[in-house]
């Protein structure tokens, strides 16, 4: 039996910067050209432009899990008292940013956000947390919600939203809906759905399990 070798094609790169705009690392998205039946269609890797040795360039930098996507613009929005949107992925984030919204995301995938990342939004008056329409999405948005509370963002300043059509923000916008047409999700419903999360279900859905 021949050994399966994953073949990929680079699609795009998402640069993560420090508060001043200096690139710390890139998250590189790849399309899987020969996916297994029912398997994942995409994969991600890191590129560290500041690594001293070429062999280290694909390793995740030590500080990566403390950084949010689009950080300088998000910090400016917090300082100005504007709404910040927080999505589950960088592509969703870019879709909202293109429309003029202050938007961020975390690079680790559903359920892997850290307290250090949430702390960047300390002082925000209003944060819209977008959740994907699945159980891992509910688990992820519940974690973001509670980490924001721990960072001092007021409960009444945190809103959870999901797509009116499709699974995520991009599906919502591609269907012709505006941001104001998003569906508000009750936090009790989020808690109930998040309680159904299992590592096995996450892996089956193509997520890295918590």
Image (cartoon, helix red, strand yellow):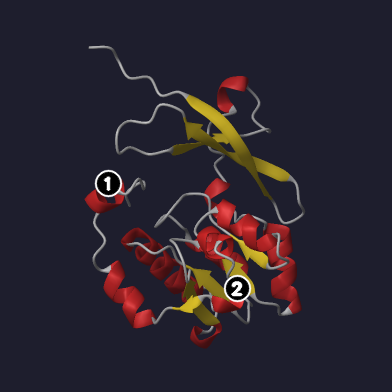
The structure residue drawn at horizontal position 55% and vertical position 36%, both measured from the top left corner, is 46
How far, Cα to Cα, is label 1 from label 2?
A: 30 Å
Q: Secondary structure at mark 1?
A: helix
What x and y, as percent, mark residue 148? Answer: 50, 73
Q: Secondary structure at mark 2?
A: helix
Disc 1 designates what residue?
Answer: 204
Task: Name which of mark 1 and mark 2 comes first in the sequence.
Answer: 2
Q: Is residue 168 above or below residue 3?
A: below
The structure residue drawn at horizontal position 33% and vertical position 52%, both measured from the top left corner, is 210
The structure residue drawn at horizontal position 54% and vertical position 63%, both measured from the top left corner, is 175
Disc 2 designates what residue?
Answer: 179
The structure residue drawn at horizontal position 65% and vertical position 76%, both measured from the top left corner, is 83
* Residue placed most toward the observer, 40 or 177: 177
Q: Is residue 72 above or below residue 162?
A: above
Quadrant for the N terminus, please. top left
**Which label sits in the foreground, 1 or 2?**
2
What x and y, as percent, mark residue 94? Answer: 64, 55
74 horizontally vs 203: left or right: right
Residue density around tag 1, few if under 14, some if 14–19, many if 20 or more, within 10 Å: few
């Amino acid at each position: 039996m021949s050994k399966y070798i994953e073949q990929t094609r680079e699609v795009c790169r998402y640069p993560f910067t420090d508060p001043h705009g200096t690139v710390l690392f890139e998250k590189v998205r790849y399309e899987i050209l020969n996916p297994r039946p029912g398997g994942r269609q995409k994969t991600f890797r890191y590129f560290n432009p500041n690594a001293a040795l070429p062999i280290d360039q694909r390793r995740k930098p030590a500080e990566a899990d403390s950084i949010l996507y689009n950080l300088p613009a998000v910090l400016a929005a917090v300082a100005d008292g504007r709404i910040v949107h927080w999505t589950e992925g960088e592509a969703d984030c870019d879709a909202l940013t293109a429309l003029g919204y202050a938007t961020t995301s975390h690079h680790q995938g559903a359920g892997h956000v850290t307290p250090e990342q949430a702390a960047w939004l300390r002082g925000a008056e209003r944060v819209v947390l977008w959740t994907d329409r699945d159980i891992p999405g509910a688990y992820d948005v519940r974690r973001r919600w509670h980490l924001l509370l721990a960072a001092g963002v007021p409960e009444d300043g945190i809103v959870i939203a999901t797509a009116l059509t499709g699974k995520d923000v991009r599906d919502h916008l591609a269907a012709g809906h505006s941001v104001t047409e998003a569906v508000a999700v009750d936090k009790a419903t989020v808690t109930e759905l998040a309680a159904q999360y299992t590592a096995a279900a996450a892996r089956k859905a193509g997520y890295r399990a918590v």
